[in-house]
Structure formats: C-alpha cells, structure tokens
Amino acid sequence: MADSSQWWRSAAIYQIYIRSLADGDGDGVGDLAGIRSRLPYLERLGVDALWITPWYPSPMADGGYDVADYRDIDPLFGTLREAEALISEAHGRGLRVLIDLVPNHTSDRHRWFQAALAAGPGSPERDRYIFRDGDEPPNDWRSVFGGPAWTQVGDGQWYLHLFDPTQPDLNWAHPEVVAEFEDILRFWLDRGVDGFRIDVAHGLAKQKGLPALGVSELVLPTDRLDHPHWDREEVHEIYRSWRRISEAYGPDRIFVAEAWVATPERLARYVRPDELHTAFNFDFLRCAWDAASLREVIDTSLAAMSSVGAPATWVLSNHDVIRHVTRYGGGDLGLRRARAALLLMDALPGSVYHYQGEELGLEEVEDLPEEVLQDPKWERSGHQNRGRDGCRVPLPWNGKRPPFGFSTGTPWLPQPAHWSTLTAEAQDADENSMLSLYREALHQRRQIGTGELSWVDSPDGVLSFRRGEGFLCVANLSPVPYPLPEHERVLLASTPLDNGKLPTDTTVWLAT
C-alpha cells in the first residue's frame, strides 16, 4: 500500500452496503465472506478505499444502523476474526477500509438502554439517554422516519429517538457517552481500520431544555442557526477530541462526516484543520442535471472547503437516496446522463464516492412487492413512503437469472430479471459497458493530478474546465452538439463523439 498520509484528499472510495454486495454463506444476505471474495473485483475497478456500512451486532430494525454492540460483528455477517482478515486482505491489495460509526443513537437492545429501562426514572443509567417526565411528549420534535420523536415507556417517562423508536438517542452531554465512543474509536483503530464514516454527524448535540421547534416538520437541512437538535455548536468539540485520537494513530487515519446542513459554509465548519477530515457533499448529489446549477454547486463547494484547507467530496448515489440513473430520467436517458456524470464528477478536485452497483448502471428498483419492504420508513409513514429498499437490492454478478451469483440462496430483496444484461460478468469484456467506463475513468483519474479547477468559457449548457496543465474536461448538457475545443487527443468519452462534436448529455476528457 502506498504510504501517503494525504491519500484521502483525492481518493476514490467504494461504498459497500454489506447486506447487498455478495453473500458467502448462502443465507441470502451479504456478509464479510462475500466482500472478501470480491476484493479482486474491487482492486481491478480502481478504487482506493472501501466504506462498509454497519457490521455490528444489531436487531436490524434499520439495516444495522441500530447498533447493539460497537465492538463486535453481527453473526449474520461473520466474526471479528473475519473482519480483521478482511482489513488485512484489503490492505494487501492496496485498498484502505473505512467503517461506519453510529454515535447519535444505539439500538434499544444495547446493554446501556436495557439497563436504563430496568433502573427506572432518575437513575444514572437513564442519564446516558434523553428521558423526560410528562403526560404528553416533552416537545414537538419529529422523527426523521415519520411520527413523533418520543416514545413512552411503562413507568411513564418518554425517551427521545430522532429516528426509529428502536434507536434511542444518546445524551452527548454525559461524560460516559463521550468516553465510550473514544474507546470504540481506539478499539477499531487498533484493528487496522483506516477511518470512519460518521452517521448523523450533525445530530449529536441537543439544546439544553429541549425547546419546541414550533413547526410540524423540520427534519433535514435547516437555515436555523439555533436549531435545537441539528448542527449545533457543541458537536465540534466532540470532533476535536476524535481528531486528537486519530492523529495519535497517524495522519492517514481519517473521518468522513454525514452532515446534512444548510450551506457549504456550515459544512466547512466540520472539516476545519482540528476537526474531521472530509464531509459528504450532498448539494452535489441533490443537484439537478443542469449545467448552471452544477457549476454553482461546484464553485460554492470548492470555495467553502478551500476556506478551511479541506478537500471537497463528490457523490452521486448512496444507500439512502434513489439511484442516479433513475433520478436522471431512467432508461437510456438516465444511463447516458449517468455516464456523463461519472466523468464530470471524477474530473473534479477532491475525493469521490461510488456506491456499489452504480458501476453496473443499476437503476432504482421501484416495483418491489410491498411484502418484502424492510425500511422502517415504510411502516412509520403508514405505508405512504416506500423507503430506501429500492437502492439496496443485491448486486448481479453473473448468470442469466436471479440470484445472479449474489448468493446460493434466496436474496433478502428480489432482483429484477432484466438485470441479466447488467451483471458484472456480462459487462466485463464489453469495452462500451458502464463497468468498462468506470474502470477506465478510475484508472485515468489518477493521472489527472492535483491541479486546481479553472473554468473555460463555454456556451450555456456546457461545462468546461481545466485541471492544471494539459487536462480539459467538457460536459455538454445542452440540447445541441458542441464542437470540441482544440486538443491533442481524446482521453475518454462517456459516449461516442459525433464527427468532432460532443453530443448532448456527454462528457469528454481531453489532453491539450
């Protein structure tokens, strides 16, 4: 493995939703053995690191984001020894490993919460969570998954859960909570992990007194600087202490924040030099397929991150959002735009995250039968919100029919039969496939260098920028073909060029 302490500034990271990458034991659920079997594929793909979603013991009420024990592996996925072997084998292939940390809440099966229920009101055990008295819910806060954010227990007290009732929020004003997570960090750093993705990084601190919101729903990014439970000032001291811990293991151990905040400037506060290293750029993910909007997001993101000396991150899909092939229009149009978006994103300065299956061109599975839906959003919304299962369907690896080499058993979510043309095997030898484009883009991306972005004048609907000397990226989002500027040669194009012109919804990399 290259010994670069700054690897994270320009890395390509592959997100593994562990339940759906590959199943090694035939029970229909992805696991550590499955990941280990696909390391050669991931190495060949050309990524630098893997981010693995929670692998801890969990009742799986929210796909593992309800953690019962932060220092072990759920038997569904394997053993702690297998996790250590996976880390070692990944390192042997030049792949670093980031794991998911879930510090805002635990599972209601966690030993701390079970002790809190047993100990009763006023006990030290309850102080680790947020319990309150009252005949009614303590305030008007809402759960992200729908409904109130408070649940009453048998003795009359209420506990806070900004997500599912099985995910009680921790009290981060309690020194035992602070000390516990510092020890958890050391536990995994001692086992060789290269860093952590921090779930709900903007949500740990709650305002004293738990004041009412005063509105019926205020869940994701808010312009309120005094929001009682999102993006509060107190979270930053937590991350300063974590940074001191990671630095003790070396400058190459890193954090990436999932922080849904109002502006790039607010996000930049999480990645100041003594806090976290990087943070997901959700403005780019949520941006429409529109040249002016994308340019504005790119500019504001780069400016905000540069102001604190941090790199930008770029991401198109993850396990919580509709896959971007579908968001960009679906079908052939969505695929064409997804190919163009790949080259646009991978040419930007900073790090990039790729969600498993996007390299195969997978779309959102929008017709899953209701009886197989497992996301808690489905039940919490009264069957109004189908949730996120459509982007979590297991990957197709080979063969002509489900389960497409994912498992020898029945996958935990059914795969569409038409994915037979999208398997990794079917795309492997096709130089025009999405998989081939990803491989080539990721390998060529390493040659772009670290040059800053400078825009080149271009018509409306066209994005054109340089990265240092000799590299030009041009993306045509306009409705008409665009004549290529002067260049020495074409390095890579998302779709075939048309007699020296760049077709609509196409991106090209040029050597100049």
Image (tube, helix red, strand yellow):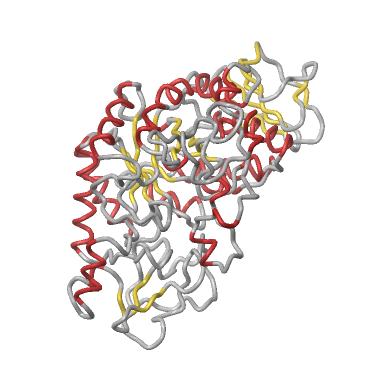
Q: For residue 308, what is the image quadrant?
A: top left
Q: Residue at x 32, y 64 (%)?
A: 108
Q: Position of residue 226 (x, y in %)?
A: 43, 69
> Who's the residue at 80% across and 27% down the image?
481
Q: Position of residue 192 (x, y in %)?
A: 24, 34
Residue depicted at x 50% and y 72%: 147
**In the image, is residue 472 above or below residue 189?**
above
Q: Count the labels in the image.
A: 0
Q: For the view shown, which residue lies furthest in the top direction?
A: 488
The residue lying toward the viewer, choosing from 371 and 87, is 371
Specify the quadrant of the image occupied by residue 117.
Answer: bottom left
Q: Which quadrant: the C terminus?
A: top right
Residue 205 occupies quadrant? bottom left
Q: Work out whether 323 lies above or below 216.
A: above
Q: Residue furthest front?
A: 409
| Residue 489 appears left or right of 502 | left
In the displayed image of the protein, which residue is found farthest to the bottom?
135
Residue 313 x %, y %: 47, 39
> Is 163 above or below relative to 450?
below
In this picture, residue 128 sits left or right of residue 470: left
Q: Give 383 or 463, whichever is nearer the viewer.
A: 383
Q: Quadrant of the N terminus?
A: top left
The residue closer to the viewer here, 250 or 73, is 73
Q: Position of residue 465 (x, y in %)?
A: 62, 29
Q: Is residue 390 above or below residue 153?
A: above
